[in-house]
Image (cartoon, grey):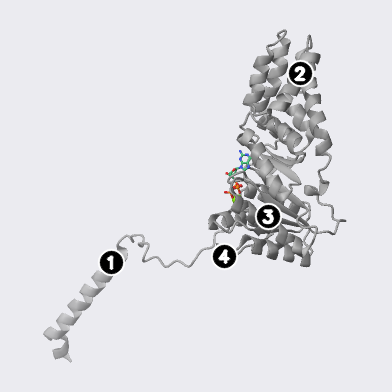
C-alpha cells in the first residue's frame, strides 16, 4: 500500500487530477460570450402582433371629393364663363375657345353661345353661372332619368340577379371601378360575384382578385387565354343558379376601332343572355374624362356594338374636360350612371346631376 502511494504513477495521477480541477474552474469562470445565431436554440417565441390601427384620415365628404375632383374643370372652364361676364360684355370668341378646349361638341357650344348672347347681357357672374347650369341641366335631365337606382343601391326585397357588363378602352378604369362597386354593394349586404373575363393578361385577373379579396366577394377566373365568353357564361350561370344579387363582368380593354375585338364583346354579351334573357341588365361603358373629344367617338362605337345602358365617367379629377359628359349624354342619349374622381373606393359615386352641375359651374 505504502508503495502504491509513493509510486510515480500515483504522483502523476494526483497531478493530472489537480490540473483537471484547475482547468475546469478556469473555463467556468470565463465570461460567457453570447451564442452565435446558428448556435442559439431558444424555443420559438410567438409574439402577438400589436394591432395598430391605420392612421385615420379625416373623412372627406363626397361633396368635397367631387369639388376637389372638378376643381380644374371649374376654374379653367365653367366657372370662368361667369367671371368673364362679370367684367362687362365678354368676347364670345374667348368663351367659344374655352369651351372647345374643354372638348364640348360644336353643336352644343354654338347653342350655349347663342343663349349667352341672348340672355347673358348685363348679368352678374352668379346669374351667368345659373344660366349655364340651367342650360346643361335641360340637356341632360331627360336622359339621366333613365338610371336604375339598383345600379348602386342594393334592395334586398328585389330577389333578381342583376348582371352588369363593364366595357371600355384600355386603361379607362374598368377593373378599378368593378372593385369599388363590388366593395360598395357588398357593404350594403348584397351577394356579389365577379367574372374575370380579361383572360388575355394574367396580371389583369390578379388585379381583380386583389379587389375581390379585399371586398370579400367571389370571383370566377380561368386559365389565361380561355375564351372570355366562356368565363362570362360560367359566371352568369353560377350567379343565377346560386341566387347572387349582383354579377359584375370585367372585360379586356380594347380599341373601339378594332372591329374583331368589338365583335368578340358583342358575342360575350349574347352568350350571357342565353342563361337569362334579361342578362346583362346593364352594359356600362367606362370613359376616362381625360379622353375628351375622343370619348364621344368611343362611346358611339361601343354603343353601336353593345347598346349601352349607362356610362361610368372616371378620372374627372385632374382633367379640365369633366364637362364633356354633357356633350356625350346629349349626343348618345345614354345616361351617366357613376362618376369617379380618384382611385379609392369612396371616389366613386352614383352620378347626381344637380350636384355634378352645381359643382362644375361653381354654384
Ligand atoms: N385619378 C384617377 N385614377 C383612376 C380612376 N379610376 C381608375 N383610375 C386608375 O386608372 C388606372 C387604370 O385602371 P384600371 O382599372 O386598371 O383600368 P382598366 O380599364 O381595367 O384597364 P385595362 O384592363 O388595362 O383595359 C389605375 O391606375 C387606376 O387606379 C379615377 O377616377 N381617378
Ligand atoms: Mg382591367
Q: Earlier in the sequence, mark 4 or mark 2?
A: 2
Q: Is label 4 in contact with label 2 (beta carbons under 8 Å)?
A: no
SS at mark 3? helix
- Is residue 204 in view from this perspective? yes
Q: CA distance from mark 1 to mark 2?
A: 103 Å
For marks 3 and 2, give the CA distance: 41 Å
User: Where is residue 194 drawn, in percent x and y?
Assistant: 68, 58
* Disc 1 crowd, CA 10 A, few/some/many (<14, 14-19, 20+): few
**Which circle, 3 or 1, is nearer the viewer?**
3
Q: Which residue is mark 3?
A: 266
Q: CA distance from mark 3 to mark 1?
A: 85 Å
* SS state under label 1: helix
Residue at the limit of the structure toward the left, as seen here: 8
User: Which of these two is toward me, 179 or 17?
Assistant: 179
- Chain-order first, disc 1 or disc 4: 1
- The residue that mark 1 highlights is 27
Please tell me which residue is depicted at 66% across the width and 50% down the height of the picture: 179
Say which of 19 and 118 sits in front: 118
Disc 1 C-beta below 8 A from ligand 1: no
Q: Is residue 299 above or below residue 243?
A: above
Marks counted in the figure total 4
Question: Which residue is most to the bottom?
Answer: 1
Pair 1/4: label in front: 4
| Front: mark 1 or 2 | 2
Identify the disc placed on residue 223: 4
Label 4: few (<14), some or many (≥20) within 10 Å? few
Amino acid at each position: 500500500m505504502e508503495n502504491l502511494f509513493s509510486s510515480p504513477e500515483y504522483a502523476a495521477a494526483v497531478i493530472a487530477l489537480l490540473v483537471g480541477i484547475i482547468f475546469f474552474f478556469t473555463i467556468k469562470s470565463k465570461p460567457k460570450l453570447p451564442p452565435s445565431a446558428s448556435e442559439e436554440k431558444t424555443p420559438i417565441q410567438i409574439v402577438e402582433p400589436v394591432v395598430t390601427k391605420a392612421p385615420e384620415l379625416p373623412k372627406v365628404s363626397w361633396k368635397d371629393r367631387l369639388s376637389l375632383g372638378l376643381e380644374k374643370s371649374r376654374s379653367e372652364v365653367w366657372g370662368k364663363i361667369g367671371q368673364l361676364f362679370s367684367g362687362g360684355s365678354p368676347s364670345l370668341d374667348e368663351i367659344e375657345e374655352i369651351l372647345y378646349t374643354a372638348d364640348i361638341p360644336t353643336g352644343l357650344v354654338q347653342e350655349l353661345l347663342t343663349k349667352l348672347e341672348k340672355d347673358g347681357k348685363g348679368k352678374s357672374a352668379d346669374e351667368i353661372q345659373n344660366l349655364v347650369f340651367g342650360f346643361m341641366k335641360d340637356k341632360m335631365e331627360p336622359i339621366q332619368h333613365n338610371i336604375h337606382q339598383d345600379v348602386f343601391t342594393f334592395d334586398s326585397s328585389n330577389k333578381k340577379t342583376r348582371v352588369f357588363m363593364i366595357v371600355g378602352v384600355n386603361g379607362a378604369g374598368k377593373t378599378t371601378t368593378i372593385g369599388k362597386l363590388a366593395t360598395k354593394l357588398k357593404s350594403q349586404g348584397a351577394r356579389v360575384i365577379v367574372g374575370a373575363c380579361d383572360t388575355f393578361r394574367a396580371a389583369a385577373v390578379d388585379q381583380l382578385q386583389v379587389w375581390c379579396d379585399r371586398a370579400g366577394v367571389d370571383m370566377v377566373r380561368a386559365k389565361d387565354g380561355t375564351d372570355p365568353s366562356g368565363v362570362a357564361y360560367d359566371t352568369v350561370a353560377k350567379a343565377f343558379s346560386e341566387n347572387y344579387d349582383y354579377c359584375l363582368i370585367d372585360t379586356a380593354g380594347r380599341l373601339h376601332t378594332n372591329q374583331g375585338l368589338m365583335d368578340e364583346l358583342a358575342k360575350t354579351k349574347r352568350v350571357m343572355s342565353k342563361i337569362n334573357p334579361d342578362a346583362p341588365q346593364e352594359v356600362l361603358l367606362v370613359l376616362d374624362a381625360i379622353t375628351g373629344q375622343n370619348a364621344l367617338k368611343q362611346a358611339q362605337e361601343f354603343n353601336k356594338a353593345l347598346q349601352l345602358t349607362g356610362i361610368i365617367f372616371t378620372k374627372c379629377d385632374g382633367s379640365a374636360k369633366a364637362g364633356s359628359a354633357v356633350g356625350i349624354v346629349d349626343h348618345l342619349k345614354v345616361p351617366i350612371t357613376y362618376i369617379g374622381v380618384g382611385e379609392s373606393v369612396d371616389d366613386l359615386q352614383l352620378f347626381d346631376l344637380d350636384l355634378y352641375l352645381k359643382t362644375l359651374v361653381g354654384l
